[in-house]
Amino acid sequence: GAKLRVAPHVLEAIEKGIKNPDPWLSEFIGAQLLAIEDVVFDVVARETGLDKSLREQILADIARVGARVQLNDFLCCDRFDVMNRLSEIKAPTLVLAGSLDVLTPPKYGAYLAQHIQGATMVVIEGGTHHFFAEKPEQTNRAISHFMKSL
């Protein structure tokens, strides 16, 4: 997206996780941040046969990276706003989105594609925020097709 605000309570919860990682992992990451994604993930898993081990791997990666890195990531997102500068992008641009992404919905990608001259958008059907890991073949196919078009 061109602007990625993060709710203040989310930033506060991550900040608390720097000093106290156990509640951050179990209460915030496991319960709050991924609660909506879990519902979507369960739907995707049922429809596509996606293995739940991918979800566990993602959670393990978040835990390994830690709250401090996640806070910096989310602060960068919260401060990120290039909505008024998209027309300056002149390079060929591929916008990818997961059709079931609730953290960065496809409408954010559509906005990019509409405001970057000549941009191409591909929605990865059945993909969530982690579509690149869930649907690697479709993602790679979209990237390959885009690169060949240049």
Image (spheres, helix red, strand yellow):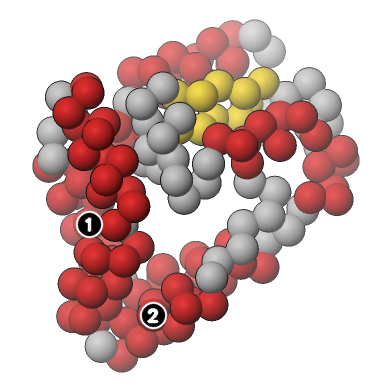
Q: Is residue 122 left or right of residue 91?
A: left
How many circles with numbers are drawn on the protein? 2
Q: Is residue 128 above or below residue 20?
A: above
Element on which disc 2 rests = helix
Q: Residue at x 45, y 30 (%)?
A: 99
Asked if residue 10 can be seen in this view, the reply is: yes
Query: What residue type is disc 2 on?
Result: Ala
Residue 89 position by quadrant: top right
Q: Is residue 79 left or right of residue 88?
A: left
Q: Residue beneath label 1, please?
A: 59
Res 13 label: 2
Task: Classify residue 66 as left or right of residue 56.
Answer: right
Query: Badge 1 local density, few (<14 within 10 Å), some, or many (20+)?
Result: some
Residue type at mark 1 is Leu
Give the number of the disc on residue 27: none
Q: Residue at x 41, y 68 (%)?
A: 70
Residue 85 percent across, percent down from the top left: 84, 48
Q: Position of residue 107 (x, y in %)?
A: 61, 37
Question: Real-space Cα distance between discs 2 and 1?
Answer: 17 Å
Q: Nearer the viewer, residue 147 or 82?
A: 82
Q: Residue at x 21, y 39 (%)?
A: 42
- The crowd level at tag 2 (other Cα within 10 Å; few <14, some 14-19, many 20+) is some
Q: Name the N-terminal-most of marks 2 and 1.
A: 2
Q: Quadrant of the C terminus?
A: top right
The percent position of residue 123, horizontal first and vertical second, equals: 51, 24
Residue 14: x %, y % from top left? 39, 77
Q: Which of the 4 quarters of the picture holds residue 77?
A: bottom right
Foreground of the two, 4 or 69:
4
Q: Is residue 34 left or right of residue 7?
A: left
